Amino acid sequence: MTAAQATQLAIQGTFDELGTPLREVSFVVVDLETTGAGPQAGITEIGAVKVRAGQQLGEFQTLVNPGAPIPPFVAVLTGITDLMVATAPQLGAVLPQFLSFADGCVLVAHNAPFDVGMLRRACAQLGYQWPTFDVVDTALLARRTLTLDEVANCRLATLARFFRAGTTPNHRALADARATVDVLHGLLERVGSYGVFSLEELGTFSARVSRAQVAKRHLAARMPSAPGVYLFKDARGEVLYVGKSRNLRARVRTYFTASETRSRITEMIGLATDIVPIVCATGLEAEVRELRLIAEHKPRYNRRSRFPERAHWLKLTTEAFPRLSLVREIREETTGYLGPFGSRRVAEQAMTALHEAFRIRQCATRLSVRRHSPACVLAELGRCNAPCQGGESIEEYGQHVRAVEAAMHTDIRSLLTAHTGRIDALSSAQRYEEAGVHRDRLSAFVRAAARMQRLTALIGCRQLVAACPSSTRPGHWELAVVRSGRLAGTGAMPPGAVPATFVAALVASAETVVPGSGPLPAALAEETEVILRWLEQPGVRLVQLDGQWALPIHGAEAVKQRLDASAAESELTLSGSGRRTVRPMHRPAG
């Protein structure tokens, strides 16, 4: 090992980088003695010790009158008799005192589900509000950190001997709580060697840190505490993984602790030699940059959005008698497209929904107005008006094309009526499987059309400026400049700034966007959707708008919202007879 490598391995970040440092957490270690193990058992003694940073802050101990006789074997085990608790306060008087003692602390118990569960039930029975405590179970933590070669079991007495506790547990609440304190400190020292230094990491701790994670921990040393994007790179400079965070330092350091258990990411860390941070002004910018970088570099360890160019589109062809076609490449046309679809199967479902609602031809032959072509079987079945045989003129056939375009972009009512009528008829005839197929096709089209219409509405705005109160920096406002559906600029306006001046400067420095061709002329669909989610969150204010941002009144969005709201009812469910049932959809009024 070289001197440089030794120096790198010795680098360790500060506790403050990891969330809530364990040295700043106040723990209340609690133990209960009860009349039994069942849910009807009563509490006979409560013992608790409050500690922080290894120092004892206080103790709490009291006997409790359970209001019922103590079984003889419990009295022998604990040494607590009916005579001892005869004059003790009842739980209703004791519980508020304990909750006040533990207020703002993390509860710790050995076999915490039992002790904490007893306290929860007591609060519910007595009408007290149970605080939202974080809970640490020393028994569970011991099972994750100690091996059978070290301890034969994870009982409190065994662990107390292993960690050389100053108090021997004896089935009395305060003594057992004191012993658990020493066990807790021993376990925290053990997990600290695995890279667990914060309360958040302690809560997700499940396995040891790999050698690769320990060896590469120095890579996170220069991460800033700011929102942004980070890129893991290998020795050749290839981008292995792209991620985003509102706090780069805190997020990146989790990759080198025991809280990271994903096998693919652990493998990636073994290959990484550098992490490049890109600081962003806002969380919105970080989300957008992540999508753009994933699309640009296609990192092998990112699972989503790596190949947006492979998406499927449904297109109306440009010819005398247009037809629907599934394509991967977008031409010069800006209309006539529906998508993008994540899979060919869903795209085919949406196309079939249109074919079943409108008499648009399904053959792939390029038709000519001057000469006829052989008719297909659909013409013989009466499902096509055979423009190939002169059955329809260009003007007559254009009515079907305009109906398809309207369903895709402005008015879904005719398509919805056709499909809901067919679904209702099939359901009435108890042909539930066929009804389910038609329902899935309709759902695929509705969701794709609603998405396309939402994207198109924002893309049609030449410039939009919006502001939202910052959720991470009080008093700040996050602003975004959106041009043709693309994020052109973003910034955080500090308290005291002149809004008009700040907005003018942000707009002037924003990216110049020259829209291209196709339905997505300036940005990926995923980027525009991220912007839409940001614009639709509570508190967002519209500052400037150049264009018209609106959805068609009879568009697919309202239908999609109804589908989402009634998803549980509209899904196929098993009836009492074991058959699948489909709930009919309501036809739109008007």
Image (spheres, helix red, strand yellow):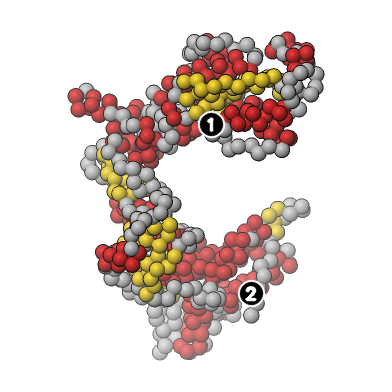
Asked if residue 333 is positioned above or below residue 190 in the image, the reply reads below
Q: Could you tell me the amino acid type at mark 1?
A: Cys
Depth order, front residue of 171/502: 502
Residue that appears at 43% across and 57% down: 469
| Mark 2 crowd level (few <14, some 14–19, many ≥20, 10 Å Cα) | few
| Dot 1 or dot 2, earlier in sequence | 1
Q: Do the residues labelled 1 and 2 touch (CB within 8 Å)?
A: no
Residue that appears at 55% across and 11% down: 167
Write down the residue under mark 1.
105
Depth order, front residue of 47/291: 47
| Mark 1 crowd level (few <14, some 14–19, many ≥20, 10 Å Cα) | many
Task: Tell whether 257 sits left or right of 377.
Answer: left
Write down the residue under mark 2.
588
Residue that appears at 55% across and 76% down: 554
Asked if residue 46 is positioned above or below residue 245 in the image, the reply reads above
Is label 1 in a helix, a strand or a loop?
loop
Q: Could you tell me the amino acid type at mark 2?
A: Pro
Q: Quadrant of the C terminus?
A: bottom right
Q: Position of residue 495 (x, y in %)?
A: 36, 56
